[in-house]
Image (tube, grey):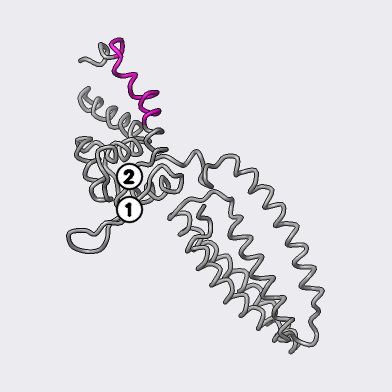
Amino acid sequence: MKTITSFLLKFALAASVLALIFRYFLSYGIENKAPMIIIVSSVLYGVAMFINGFYFGKKDSEYLPIYDVGFRFHFTTYLIHNTISELWFILGFKSPYEKIEVVHVTTLIWGIFLIIHFIFFLRTRKNTINSLNKEDLFE
Amino acid sequence: MSNEEKLKELLSSWEDTYKKGQLTLWIFLSLRESKKYVDEIKEFVETQSNGTITCEEQSLYRALRKYEHIDVLKHELRKGIKGPERKYYYLTDLGNELFNQFVTRNIRLFYSEEIKKFLNP
């Protein structure tokens, strides 16, 4: 079943770039004790990720309307953001004032929301055939 | 509004509703005839329906992608006379069975003597 589409991969690529840029400015802001840089980069990251998801999600749905209540895009975002955050620490790019525990707690709390989203996704699967909404199959 | 104008508007409104859901049937009909690529399917649908069913190429592509995804259609690549390879679509066994059962349950009704006498003007 083709659920990893080309638009999801393009979204993942853009999300990786955005997450890297965000991590850089976050560490830079923390290291230089500049709250404005932290706030602005966080807001811009959130907005850019929303636009990224909206654009590629729309394209993906126009190509093939996979009925997953956005779970594939959410799961991809979760994986990319948290993997890049972990790698940022492991590779030693973090500022001296950052703690790995913050990343772990974020992953954990976000993971709980992801599980809730997954439960909704499993429920919607009952109304699908090969991941397409039964009510939207035929024209 | 004259009766003629009213009739025209009512007919148009009824046809708009009726046509929703017709495209699948016409795509399947065209592929029962032979394997076809998108332009041929479009031409078949528009010609055989006397122009009452029209379809945008984009919506046709989208429908074909969905039907392939649910395994009722497949395609094979064939070289066109000129230009690139084309996707020739055809019904799978599942697609043929789906079409047969749909026609038996929904279309063959109109061939019964009881119904035919009401269809005659």
The residue lying furthest to the bottom in this view is: A32
Q: Position of residue A120 (x, y in %)?
A: 66, 47
Q: Which label number is shown at residue B90?
A: 2
Instruction: Residue at 29%, 45% (x, y): give it.
Output: B55
**Quarter of the rendering occupied by the C terminus of chain A:** top left
Instruction: Residue at 44%, 54% (x, y): give it.
Output: A62
Report the label total.
2
Q: Callout 2: few (<14), some (14-19), or many (20+) C-alpha neighbours within 10 Å?
A: many
- Kind of residue indicated by mark 2: Tyr
Q: Callout 1: few (<14), some (14-19), or many (20+) C-alpha neighbours within 10 Å?
A: few
| Left-right relation of B27 to B48 | right
* Magenta stretch bounds: B100-115
**Gap in angstroms between the C-alphas marked 2 and 1:** 8 Å
- Kind of residue indicated by mark 1: Glu
Q: Position of residue B12 (x, y in %)?
A: 28, 32
- Image height check: is B57 above or below B26? below
Instruction: Residue at 69%, 76% (x, y): give it.
Output: A39
Indicate the chain on which mark 2 is placed: B
Report which residue position mark 1 lands on. B76
Q: Position of residue B11 (x, y in %)?
A: 27, 28
